Image (cartoon, grey):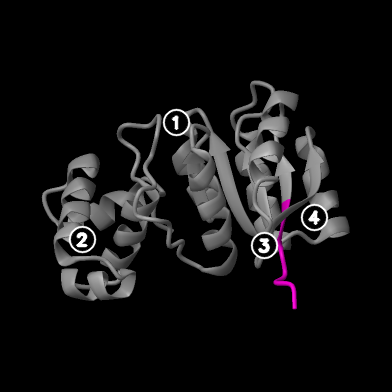
Amino acid sequence: METKRITVLVAEDTEMGTIGLRNMLATARDIQIVGETNSVYAVGRLIKELSPDLLLMDLRWYDDDSAGQVQIREVKRENPELKVIALTAYPNLIADAWKAGADQVVSKNLRLEELLDLVRTVSVRNIPFPSEDISSHGFPDQLSPRELQVLELLAQALTDKEISTALGIQPNTTKNHVKNILQKLNASNRRKAVLIARERGILK
């Protein structure tokens, strides 16, 4: 029996961006693009018509910094089960995208395998479990998807050992992730890192 493919709606304001995402996703047999749009106002209608598993959503639309986050908030209110990955080249839009309800917010500089891995993991889990080599290309101070995952578990007051077990990684790797999180958030300890992340909208 053929495994059900992950259905994706691509919402990008440029034709070049749309073509790029289409070509990248087309390399995966388990992912299917069911719709594309260059209009932020068509997203809600297409979700109703196509019922995708996941929305790939640009954040900045034709010089409007708020268009993407507004649409994500509306989409999540109408379709709470729909997974949303927000894409952006503008670090200043990241916090608002998290607040709007995006399941993941990443730089547009993602490599092919990173994008495919995110689509697969975000589509099936509440907290994404990306591969170990995924990083936050283009945003030096942005937490990587793996660091975001560790931060989510820190917020649940898990120990390094418990986090290592949950993620299937070595304790030293967990310690390195925690160290990086503290440095990037300029936090002196884990509790402050969680508080800062919530203030910035990184954690919901």
**Circle 2: element type:** helix
Residue hosting label 4: 47
Q: Which of marks 3 and 1 is nearer the N terminus?
A: 3
Is there CB contact under 8 Å for labels 1 and 2? no
Please name the residue that numbered disc 3 is placed on. Answer: 82
* Residue hosting label 1: 92
Q: Which of marks 2 and 4 is nearer the N terminus?
A: 4
Q: Where is residue 35 shown, x and y percent of the image? A: 81, 47
Magenta residue check for 44:
no
Which residue was labeled with disc 2? 174
Q: Could you tell me which residue is drawn at 23 percent across and 76 percent down?
A: 162
Check disc 4: other Cα within 10 Å, few if <14, some if 14-19, many if 20+: many
Mark nearest the camera among 3 and 1 is: 3
Image spot of residue 134 (x, y percent): 39, 47
Identity of the residue furthest to the front in this view: 1
Tell me the crowding category of disc 1: few under 14, some 14 to 19, or many 20 or more residues within 10 angstroms, Cα based: few
Based on the picture, tell me whether residue 5 belongs to the magenta stretch: yes
Side of 130 where 55 appears, left or right: right
Helix, strand or loop under label 3: loop
Q: In front: 129, or 82?
A: 129
**Quarter in which the C terminus is drawn:** bottom left
Query: Tag 4: residue type?
Result: Ile
Q: Quadrant of residue 26?
A: top right
